[in-house]
Amino acid sequence: MTSGLLLKKNKHFYCDMTKIAIIIGTRPEIIKVSSVIRECIARNIEYFIIHSNQHYSENMDAIFFKELELPAPKYNLNVGSGSHSEMTAKILLGLEGILLDEKPDWVLVQGDTNTVMAGALVASKLQIKVGHIEAGLRSYDRSMPEEINRIVTDHISDVLFPPTQKQKDILKNEGIPSEKIIVSGNTIVDAVYQNLVLAEKHSEFNHYVSEKYFLLTTHRPSNVDSKENLSELVLAITGVSKKYGYPIYFPIHPRTKKQIESFDIEIDASCIKIMDPVGYLEMLVLEKNAHLIFTDSGGIQEEACILRVPSVILRENTERPETLMVGSAMLAGHDNQKIFSSAESMLNKKRDWNNPFGDGEASKIILNKMMNI
């Protein structure tokens, strides 16, 4: 039968003789492709998972597959941490042999990490079709490694899945043909809806519902690799906690923990409650019940918007401008004054904005397109 032909089987669709390699490397990628993996299973589509393992903490990565009730990766490259060049080189070397052996029809990547760019590069050179989920995001800040990864991946992909029309327009303006671009919505919407159902099974998270707290996450080099910036951020967040009388829960990224210790930055434990990295379902419950979220994570920025929880973005720019446009978030960077004023504005904000990232059907749209090429 012809590859790409959709057939009926057991009330689900599957694609005869089509094989998809799903390449992931970080926690946000695991989360955002979880709905795609479930859709592949539901349709009996042949697929396998390659995990580069960019993260090096059990709670930051591997435990997510079990928690989200996903099959374990078929391959794990165990890349770990390192410089961008070192990490990318290891991923390139590890992927090539696997793809030559497996001979997938598609490589599917999501986001903007070194894993994403390396996966797209290897597949493109091996003449394997590349699908890029969450294409077209731009911060227009090329000092961010992620920005380079986005641009390279977009321009070598065969099909691009931007979450909104705004990203489609960006891609078209960069010269990418319209027929290669399919607005899919964002798979994070699918993931949030599906994974909240899983989270409800965990009664140990119920105490967050009745608590009053703010939530903090930070890991980006612009915030945590500078002692001055990280100190100013911690001081501002502590001040916000004292002003409103709410503790700040802080599930700490290993990178951030290392830098706080290295810079000998003092944390006021009465205000900032440092937690070990938590699993995704607990994080989702933490987000859903927070009164306000401070973050430099793009994924959490999106999730907060979907969950209708106001957020203060600890960055000077964002590749998710939709959150600013609908009023779910404000940019504050690490500046003390901006963090204070943004917190006040967002706490007074009505949680009535519209979700700009789609209706939870992104995974279906993505696979429909791939299976028809």
Image (spheres, rainbow, N blue to C red):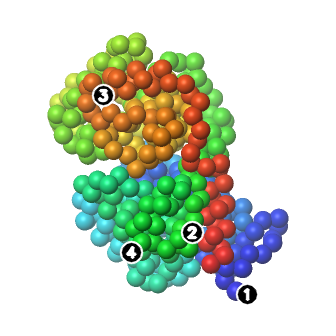
Rounded to the nearest whole Å, what is the CA distance between mark 3 and mark 4?
40 Å
Q: Position of residue 185 (x, y in %)?
A: 58, 54
What amino acid is at disc 3?
A: Lys
Rounded to the nearest whole Å, what is the CA distance between mark 3 and mark 2?
45 Å
Q: Nearer the viewer, residue 17 or 366?
A: 366
Find disc 4 in the rendering and name its residue: 121
Q: Earlier in the sequence, mark 1 or mark 4?
A: 1
Rounded to the nearest whole Å, what is the CA distance between mark 1 and mark 4?
29 Å
Find disc 2 in the rendering and name its residue: 48
Q: Earlier in the sequence, mark 2 or mark 4?
A: 2
Find disc 3 in the rendering and name its residue: 338
Q: Residue 299: give its label.
A: none
Q: Residue 1: give its label.
A: 1
Q: Position of residue 98 (x, y in %)?
A: 46, 77
Quarter of the C terminus within the rendering? bottom right
User: Which callout, 2 or 4, points to the residue nearer the camera?
Assistant: 4
Instruction: Determine whether, in the image, residue 56 is placed left or right of residue 207.
Output: left
Q: Earlier in the sequence, mark 2 or mark 1?
A: 1
Q: Residue at x 67, y 79 (%)?
A: 4
